Image (cartoon, coloured by chain):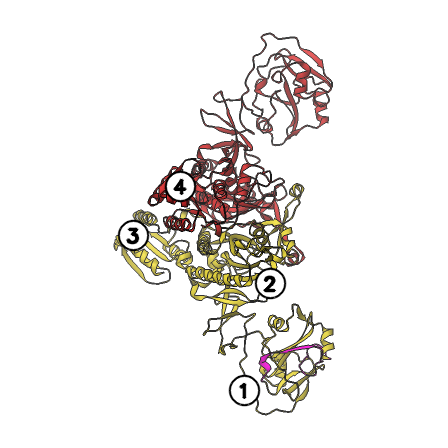
Chain colours: A yellow, B red
Amino acid sequence: MKYTKMFGKTSKADKKYESRSVEYLVRGGFVDQVMAGGYTFLPLGLRVMHKIEGIVRDEMDKIGSELLMPAIVPTEFWKQTGRFDSIDVLFKVVGANEVSLARNNAEYVLNPTHEDVIAPTAKKFNQSYKDFPFAVYQIQTKFRNEVRPKTGLLRTREFRMKDLYSFHTSAEDLKAYYEVAREAYTNVYKRLGIGDDTYYTAASGGDFTEDFSHEFQTRLETGEDLVFRSQSTNECFNKEIAPSKAVMYEQDSQMKEMEEVFGEGIIGVDDLCKFMGIKPHQTTKTLIFQSEKGVIVAAVRGDYDVNELKLKKVAGVKKLELATEDTVEKVTGAKLGYAGIVNLPGDVMVFLDDSIENLVNFETGGNKTHYHMANVNWGRDVQKPEKFYDIKIAKEGDLYPVTNEVYEVFKASEVGNIFPLNTKFTDAVGYTFTDVDGKQKQVYMGSYGIGISRLIGVIAEKFNDEFGIVWPINIAPFQVHMLTLGSDSAYAKAEEIYKMLQEKGVEVLWDDRKGASAGEKFSDADLIGIPVRVLVSDKSLEKGGVEIKARKSKEVQLIELDKVLDSITAMLKAS
Amino acid sequence: MKYTKMFGKTSKADKKYESRSVEYLVRGGFVDQVMAGGYTFLPLGLRVMHKIEGIVRDEMDKIGSELLMPAIVPTEFWKQTGRFDSIDVLFKVVGANEVSLARNNAEYVLNPTHEDVIAPTAKKFNQSYKDFPFAVYQIQTKFRNEVRPKTGLLRTREFRMKDLYSFHTSAEDLKAYYEVAREAYTNVYKRLGIGDDTYYTAASGGDFTEDFSHEFQTRLETGEDLVFRSQSTNECFNKEIAPSKAVMYEQDSQMKEMEEVFGEGIIGVDDLCKFMGIKPHQTTKTLIFQSEKGVIVAAVRGDYDVNELKLKKVAGVKKLELATEDTVEKVTGAKLGYAGIVNLPGDVMVFLDDSIENLVNFETGGNKTHYHMANVNWGRDVQKPEKFYDIKIAKEGDLYPVTNEVYEVFKASEVGNIFPLNTKFTDAVGYTFTDVDGKQKQVYMGSYGIGISRLIGVIAEKFNDEFGIVWPINIAPFQVHMLTLGSDSAYAKAEEIYKMLQEKGVEVLWDDRKGASAGEKFSDADLIGIPVRVLVSDKSLEKGGVEIKARKSKEVQLIELDKVLDSITAMLKAS
């Protein structure tokens, strides 16, 4: 394509951008911001999106059939699953003005995802055990009422997504398919150029399931997630659920005498440590929660925080929230801020983190207003429980409990997720199947997403340098960026090469601007980030050819005219 | 693809369907209705849609660059162009529930079309005469608050559309591009298989322009539009604007005496003719309108109706509505229903249709309550105006005034439209360009649409028989529908053929169901309508091959196994 014929232009930096990817995607003419969390994909950006969609479609076609559900559906679909009032990103659609409302005043949901639509649709078609398992997917625009859209394409109110749904006659069959989907996803990331840096990562199952869900996390310095990876097993966990074992510090060999320390208003760990002259890992942090089963007391070492997801699982409760001041006073006998693990009433459930199991002479709250206990010891001052639990939020330096190795911890950005929904949605819509024995049985369902527009942002954020984006070959908007400088005869020669390359199936963006300077053309090429740059200039032609250079290299090669195609092909292969 | 692996199933007729296309698309498993005007495209239907999109994209890439604007935009875009309150199909988007509204209570427009978005976007990028002309397009889902969605995919609340917008420095350049777009559209319809039956048809320019817009109308017995075509020039006009000359009936050679006829309550043409013993073409029909320039009296021959679009143009007015009873009384001196062209006051504008120019002894309203005038004659009873106009709604039998030939009139369905918007939207958003002389000048804009999902409906409605759809080859969901009947060895042979065809790039739907009867498989193949059917059965194999049949033919050929590919290829070429 000729650059002068393509809509969209590069621009100079004119403000501080949220991130490099936002800057380069906007300045390179890939996207144009229409509102917070709303972008137009300009021709360059749309080409990248179509390439990603092509790869995703190709891999998904191997494991499901593609369909396309409506973006707007009657609210009943979401009421049937009980989600209409509870999903905080849900948008609805109504007539915009009086004339429109007078025509039709019905309301519709603008779907943020399609579990609530596919479950009743699948139910219409497939009700016999013979129909199972089956999977369908779509590539579609979704809508979410995000409060704070951020970092360009990473979180937007409107976005492209591939969503796949699978249906099964048993939890086991769902699990088996889960692995099939995992493999297909792995292939997608490989082809997108992020395979080596993308990790299958366990995450919270949310409200849907006690099982973990899984995220695909791509290593990224500016990523918003923290991944804990066992290098020996390659198992990865999202910070929110990573099982962890604390590093132990050397303990005193002798128990000291327990002391009650008066410390009015000394509440945070830092203040406490300064006040008492101890380290955070010599303290404990005790929190009081309310659950549907009653009050829960949880304590972790002072350099940790309580992980509520882990605590919920350990305690077997579904609802968990910090107790009110009243409850705290009732349970501890003290004002807020002085809770500890000594002298607790017998009718509360207590869960202690394994990070405090081996402490000697540790601190804990006094359960007495303004008081802290120092030099507390198991057995002597407080009864050692039969079992300690892992209820802490993992942090860098922690060990993976299974192998006892220190986790590799890195920042990452989520590029896909897969989710065992089990029977949550199929139950809600009354979707059962007739088994071989004639009986009606529950249908199991899984859901599998890839954020396609988000991926553009993640990949641009991952592959760039100080000059611009460095696109992986398979999703670059073009394969070759040809620049021309000099006289009309250079342009004429360039046009010949342009036509020849196009005939050979090479995708070329030809910067055919006559008004732009050499500097502008070079810096635009770097900004746009197409893998191979070809320069056709009076100078290069005098030297007998054209100059070619890979975007990711500094080396420029002079290539004779009759070897242009071969050299480009070789360079593309090496990309 | 194996039929057993594909989501969606055929079904038997279980109700009265709106039309054949609706019946076949639903029963064939192409679409699933989710609500009135809302459909899921099942895998078969989506394949057809993707093929149409591919053809449209290919032709549009030759005349513009593809981008993708957001479906939701801030309401300001539509307020700036003054359309937020007036467009009757406009939808808006708001948080669906309290939690969502608490996060963000902004409102957005869910775009039914994108003139209001592309104009300010284009303005951001292209402001110099050097940037012009340029054109951009997108293939996108649009939303319209239709009151009565109808005939399956023909009018829905959510639909796929290709919308292209072009920008120019002059009206002439816009006109030149208009022809370029026309040619691209013509190529699209040719490739879709409806080229011979699709006509470039002038239609009303609506509020945007005094020029005509143009529609592409595909001949279709069940079509909702009426096209008037001059066979000698191939010019076509939508009924709403078709210029027309009435067929003249023989007139009396002698003037009779004018009579005032008392006919209380005799108002409609039919009643009047019965009452007076005359024919409709001997009567006149007079209507009184109010316009921004004052009262307008318009009369046509009694067998016609007044065409308000034509009258507006002739009278040079923008607003035209039937006058109130009060005004009618004031102008004619009579109650409603007795208006005529005699004795009109001098201060009203009068426009008479050319169908009444040559009448002798005609009837007109008496402009006196309960009275009609019979045997009225020009010159003697009423002054003959200097000029008669064409202000009638054209009807079958009318002549094209330019060539004086009788129009060919046929029903048709609109499959695309192109629209000279001129400066309406660019003015609204203050989009000007800097010309070579340094001055700011107006930008001209055109808009060009193709309803992609609608096309599926139109084509299915056009190409079918009593058994199902007969898809044109280029947009059929698959090229070959292979059926297998009989023993496992027939299935094994079919699988071989299936794999061979796939390797050769032939798109095959293989009906590999073992539970379905021969009757089911044959009738499903007819219903789905793939161009070539291949039958692999014990019987055919005994005879030494497979049976192939074109969907549109009854002839079955037995083909030897080693000639299957060649025969299919030949049959596809002939399709």
User: Mark 2 or mark 1, which is nearer the start of the sequence?
Assistant: 2
Decide: is A295 above or below B495.
below
Q: Badges 3 and 1: C-beta atoms under 8 Å apart?
A: no
Q: CA distance from mark 4 to mark 1?
A: 84 Å
Q: Badges 4 and 3: C-beta atoms under 8 Å apart?
A: no
Mark 1 Cα-neighbour bin, 10 Å: few <14, some 14–19, many ≥20: few
* Residue B368, image x, y percentages: 72, 18
Instruction: Please name the predominant secondary structure of the magenta segment in the image.
Output: loop
Query: Picture quarter containing residue B210?
Result: top right
* Residue A17, image x, y percentages: 51, 61
Residue A521 magenta:
no
Mark 2 Cα-neighbour bin, 10 Å: few <14, some 14–19, many ≥20: some
For disc 1, the marked residue is A250
Q: Nearer the viewer, mark 1 or mark 2?
A: 2
For disc 2, the marked residue is A208
Decide: is B13 above or below A516.
above
* Residue A432, image x, y percentages: 60, 55
Q: Residue at x 33, y 59 (%)?
A: A571
**Amino acid at circle 4:** Glu
For disc 3, the marked residue is A538
Q: Residue at x 55, y 52 (%)?
A: A126
Q: CA distance from mark 1 to mark 2?
A: 42 Å
Mark 3 Cα-neighbour bin, 10 Å: few <14, some 14–19, many ≥20: many
Q: Are marks 2 and 3 on the same chain?
A: yes
Query: Picture quarter containing residue A97?
Result: top right
For disc 4, the marked residue is B547
Q: Which residues are magenta?
A: A333-358
